[in-house]
Image (cartoon, grey):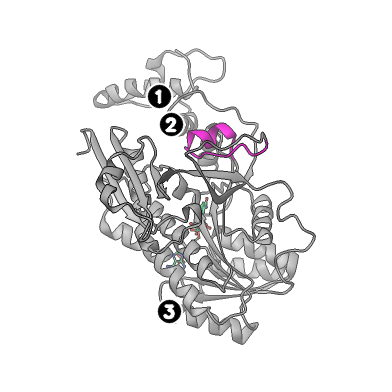
Amino acid sequence: AARRPLDLTAVLDGTLPAAGTAVTCPARAGVLGVLRTARAEHPSWDVRCLDLETAGDVEPEAGAETVLRAPSGHPVLARRAGRWLTQVFRPLPDGTGQIAASPWRPRGVHLIAGGAGGIGYALSRHLARTTAADVVWLGRRPATDAAVTERLAAVEAAGGRARYVQGDVSRPDDVRAALAVAHASFGPVTTAVHAALDLRDRTLAFAAADDLRSAMLAKDRGVRVLHEVLRDEPLDHFVLFSSAVSAIDSPGQAAYAAASTVEDALGRALHARGPVPVTVVNWGYWGSVGAVADPRRARAMAETGVGSIEPADGFAALERILAARTPQALVARATPRALRELGLVVEEAAAGKPVAEDTFVGEAVVGEAVSLEAESVAGKDPLDTLAGALLAAELTAAGALPAPGERLPAATTAQRLAVQPAHRRLFEALLPVLERAGAVRR
Ligand SMILES: NC(=O)c1ccc[n+]([C@@H]2O[C@H](COP(=O)([O-])OP(=O)(O)OC[C@H]3O[C@@H](n4cnc5c(N)ncnc54)[C@H](OP(=O)(O)O)[C@@H]3O)[C@@H](O)[C@H]2O)c1
């Protein structure tokens, strides 16, 4: 169906905490992520997910009729008490969580699944420096890995103590082994962080079941196992590092989006169950550390109005969220326009604008929507803009684009790139993409 129009509606229940209802079927929430990606990859499809209310308040006689009459144009809708609700983000009010006391106890013991990775390691150093923390990392690579040993040493140099346990967070025995190391080396665990991910980016046309399974294993099963094994620990915080991808339509990320929407739903269900204080943080883009840190991507993102969350700002936001005891928060560094283009609806709380009748203000909040100085590139389709920016970066690095102010025949650019005759049409087709990205003017 890739090339023809298609109407695709998923009818679910128990996946969204809309209007204060319980998330009863977190695993099903993966459908939201997969279909949002399908929507992004197939603009000619009309794709949406409807989360109907579970037992009690459904309108059984109107079931099919209700589904068919759902308002179009929304990727995700929840039906509660006879109304359709969409997700709206509310900015964390100024001052929320800005208290004198840190949410971290001094010399706390932090078990971090994925702790040797980019953000986990940066958080560990931050905690070592500010609270003389003890950290235990769980990761699949061997303890002899050079990056692991270097990073352990850096945490110790920053004033903490650090251990690494080789294992998989989706395997109970491995998590128990990490817990045993924490107990033997430092004592009871006071914070658990789930920061593991298995990124399997592929468009749906090329994605295999195995991609979905692996992405899910790290997050869905990983969160459940970590929560279960640590249930008797005196936890101040149980933090899930999820992604903003679960709130947007992101092409090429079906597996990761599904894992993230499940992680969110699971976090909300576990938060409601208590007593362990579970918090979901949906991170936006980190450009200097982590799985997708590279300067070229960061530049391209900046051109679309999305900036890099840097460790100092990210952890300041995290501390505000934890201090505020918010169950879920999205942290992004982006211009309001970029948020809009990504489809994130942010309530204009400051202006005191009333929320439209048919919208639902979720408990999820935007922690930090910071304006960037980078100019947004003109262009309506964010994917086209991003593709153009990446292409421009590539051609600039290859020395094929004219210098600022320089005029160059297109043929010269083709020569510099040694474009083969068979690729000549592709080259011609890419020029308008560059033009729309603002990289050249013809
Ligand atoms: N970077 C971003 O821009 C960004 C944005 C949104 C959300 N996040 C979230 O932030 C968290 C950290 O991301 P990151 O950028 O720091 O990623 P990263 O650098 O790739 O680190 C992730 C770590 O998880 C470990 N891991 C993966 N699967 C595991 C498993 N099954 N069991 C145990 N460990 C496992 C990996 O080590 P091994 O391979 O050795 O196991 C790796 O060290 C993730 O939860 C991610 O979803 C990141």
In this figure, which residue is indicated by the disc labeled 2?
A: 391
Kind of residue at disc 1:
Val
Element carrying mark 3: helix
Indicate yes or no whether the magenta region holds residue 336. Answer: yes
Kind of residue at disc 3:
Pro
Q: Is residue 241 above or below residue 346?
A: below
Element carrying mark 2: helix
Residue located 53% across and 78% down the image: 230
In this figure, which residue is indicated by the disc labeled 1?
A: 433
Q: Could you tell me residue 337's position as x and y percent?
A: 55, 31
**Magenta stretch: dominant secondary structure:** loop
- Marks 1 and 3, Cα distance to the nearest angstrom? 49 Å
- Marks 3 and 2, Cα distance to the nearest angstrom? 44 Å
The region drawn magenta spans 334-350
In this figure, which residue is indicated by the disc labeled 3?
A: 172
User: In the rendered view of the protein, which quadrant contains the C terminus?
Assistant: top left
Is residue 58 toward the left or the right of residue 270 in the image? Answer: left
In which quarter of the view is residue 235 placed? bottom right
Q: Residue furthest right?
A: 100
In which quarter of the view is residue 127 placed? bottom right
User: In the rendered view of the protein, which quadrant contains the N terminus?
Assistant: top left
Is residue 318 toward the left or the right of residue 131 in the image? Answer: left
Is residue 335 toward the left or the right of residue 414 in the image? Answer: right
Q: Nearer the viewer, residue 35 or 115?
A: 35
Tag 1 and tag 2, C-beta contact below 8 Å: yes
Q: Could you tell me residue 359's position as x and y percent?
A: 49, 41
In which quarter of the view is residue 433 placed? top left
Residue 206 visible (yes or no): no
- Marks 1 and 2, Cα distance to the nearest angstrom? 8 Å
